[in-house]
Amino acid sequence: MKTIDRFITREFARNFIYATLILVFLYIIIDLFEDLGKFIEKNVAVISLVKYYALISPYYIVLLMPVGALMATFLVLGFMTRYREVIALKSAGVSVWRLFMPILGIGIALVVGSFIFNETITVRANHKFAEVKTIEIDKRPKPSQRIRRNFFYYGENDRIFYIRQLGAAEGELFNFVIWELGPKQRIKKRFDADLAKWQNTVWTAYRVTVREFLADTAEKITRHDSLRLEDISEKPVDFMKEVKPLDQANVLELANFIRRKKKAGDDASKEKVELNYRISFPFINLILLLLGFPLSLILRKGGVAFGIGLGLLFAFTYWGLIQTFRAYGVANVVNPILAAWIPNAVFLAAGIILLVTTRK
């Protein structure tokens, strides 16, 4: 059986790589022709287009890996079924379930590999892709690395900052507000200041109004020409760290951002859905193999091409389901965890039913 395992694994790997690369190439070609007029109108250089599509390729690879794995399953086991190799093995006393063992191992490896690839390569490529798109494709100026304007910052110790302008190099905040939160995200103190300077590792604020909101709904107001904010631990460089778009953040950064938003009393449904989706999506590599394995053994009636078409239908149906439930999760119609995992549960149930009903 080791020989059969090596054969299935080798043939699967070869067909998987070919199928995935072909799918990614087709996606890129379709996208290129859709946007070709825009690229010509903006006089985009060829080298910029090469970088643009090279950097978006990791995202396409993660997206299309499950489809590539499914196609590889149909190609390997489908041809083994069509040419009676499966029947020969069964006649020799080899169970169909035994043939599934290398497929199961491959599926588990794809789950782990897809997750690691996405968290290490794809998120970094997405960041570079956004830069290339902004500067080289859309011809917009590169954002300043010295100044930020009109942004919120979720700080430590239950503080929320709104800063109209930050000069990071000079260590200055202009026209900013700080809210300190108490139990149940109730605002217990608010600072309004015209200016703050980072001096000797401490922020010194000028022309400051402090409002303290007491338990009996009373409000205490004090004003200061200058005030040292010694309990604020954030440095100028911390405020320069812009919140990453979700597709550029890894799961640890997403979890940390969700924690900070929840402490600030803000809605983090979108981030929760993305976090759970990021964890759940790699499992579709294994789940589609659970579907593809039994289907590939009954292809004598419709042929390998029919099986591949059916597999693609399953893959894109899953994609439609996950996008639908993601939208429901973001809108708080469905729990964020359920929104990410329900499509997996549906297809897993279908795969198990097919496996159980497959003739041994």
Image (cartoon, rainbow, N blue to C red):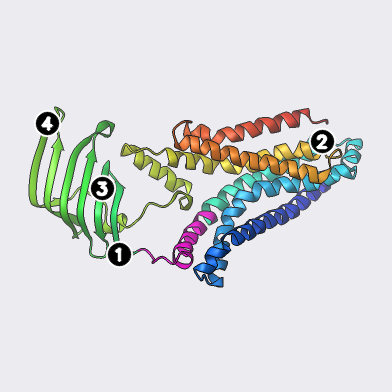
Identify the disc placed on residue 161: 3
Comparing marks 3 and 2, which lies closer to the viewer? Answer: 3
Identify the disc placed on residue 154: none
Q: If you read the primary sequence from the N terminus, does the residue marked by circle 4 or circle 2 appear first?
A: 2
Q: In which quarter of the image is the N terminus?
A: top right
In which quadrant of the rendered view does residue 82 lie? Answer: top right
Label 3: few (<14), some or many (≥20) within 10 Å? some
At x 60%, y 40%, the residue is 320
Name the residue beneath numbered marker 1: 146
The segment highlighted magenta reads 122-143
Q: Which amino acid does label 2 sit on?
A: Val
Name the residue beneath numbered marker 4: 218
Label 1: few (<14), some or many (≥20) within 10 Å? few
Q: Is mark 2 on a helix, strand or loop?
A: helix
Q: Is mark 4 on a helix, strand or loop?
A: loop
Horizontal placement of 103 versus 4: left or right? left
Measure how far apart labels 1 and 4 are at the Cα level: 40 Å
Comparing marks 2 and 1, which lies closer to the viewer? Answer: 1
Visible in this render: residue 167?
yes
Comparing marks 4 and 2, which lies closer to the viewer? Answer: 4
From the viewer's side, name the closer residue of 96 and 36.
Answer: 36
Is residue 131 highlighted in magenta? yes
Label 4: few (<14), some or many (≥20) within 10 Å? few
